[in-house]
Image (tube, rainbow, N blue to C red):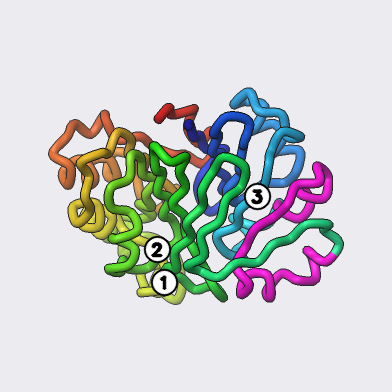
Amino acid sequence: MRFASLGSGSEGNGLVVEVGDTRVLIDCGFAVRDTVARLARLGVAAETISAVLVTHEHADHIGGVAAFAARYRVPVWLTFGTLEMVSERFARLDRVYGFDTQDVFAIGMLEVRPFPVPHDAREPVQFVVGDGAHRLGILTDIGVTTRYVETSLSGCDALVLECNHDIDMLAGGDYPWPLKQRISSRLGHLHNEASAALLAALDTSRLRHVIAAHLSQQNNTPAKARAALAQALNCSPDWIGIADQASGFAWREM
């Protein structure tokens, strides 16, 4: 089992998980041509994608899904609430599957366990995916953690964890006040210290990879995100990976 990122941030998100000949794309916030190029950078042909999983309906996560799925005849999985929000643009797709926030289902060789998160979307989820031996936890676009989130992510072998903003940088930046309030609200995004506190609350005994993701290009830095998560794990900041907007991150093996 391995995973890699096409890119992560407010301009587009996409993560690939591979087990054997099963390749699942989690979110697709890029135009089709850009998505194909980013997949090719990882050595993945677009026509080999088995399915697309969607976390929620915000454009940086779902903006390219319908066009990509139509072009390559790929099935799409999303919550019923998310589907309700995007039903018109998904109406022409052959295979669209809805699920509840606590369903468990399989796509090829991959087990998918969604879990609900607090975020300003209709029915947002994040995912834990695994192959029976290893588990990858994915958590971006969440305003505050919950006990259920912590239980879902405990014991994972790898985590992709939101570190959206630094509190001081957001407060002192030039974003409009309503946008600052949205980002820092209980339905917004995690700041570095909140992500670190979440990480410290988990069972990390199996943890081999931690990637900081969905960093704000205006209100955070990789160094700040790394430092916060490294402190929670008592490890070197260099051990913490970064998913950036332009290049995501390369394959990580589990």
Rendered location of residue 22, percent (x, y): 62, 36
Residues drawn in magenta: 65-91
Identify the secondary structure beneath mark 1: loop
Q: For mark 1, what is the residue? A: 118
Name the N-terminal-most of marks 2 and 3.
3
Name the N-terminal-most of marks 2 and 1.
1
Seen from the viewer's position, the closer of residues 240 and 1 is: 1
**Any part of residue 71 in sight:** yes
**Residue at the spot x=31%, y=66% of the render?**
145
Seen from the viewer's position, the closer of residues 130 and 81 is: 130
**Alpha carbons under labels 2 and 3: distance apart:** 23 Å
Q: Residues within 10 Å of mark 3 (few under 14, many from 20)?
A: many
Which mark, residue 52? 3
**Residue at the spot x=31%, y=58% of the render?**
191
Q: Residues within 10 Å of mark 2 (few under 14, many from 20)?
A: many
Q: Nearer the viewer, mark 3 or mark 1?
A: 3
Rendered location of residue 38, percent (x, y): 64, 33
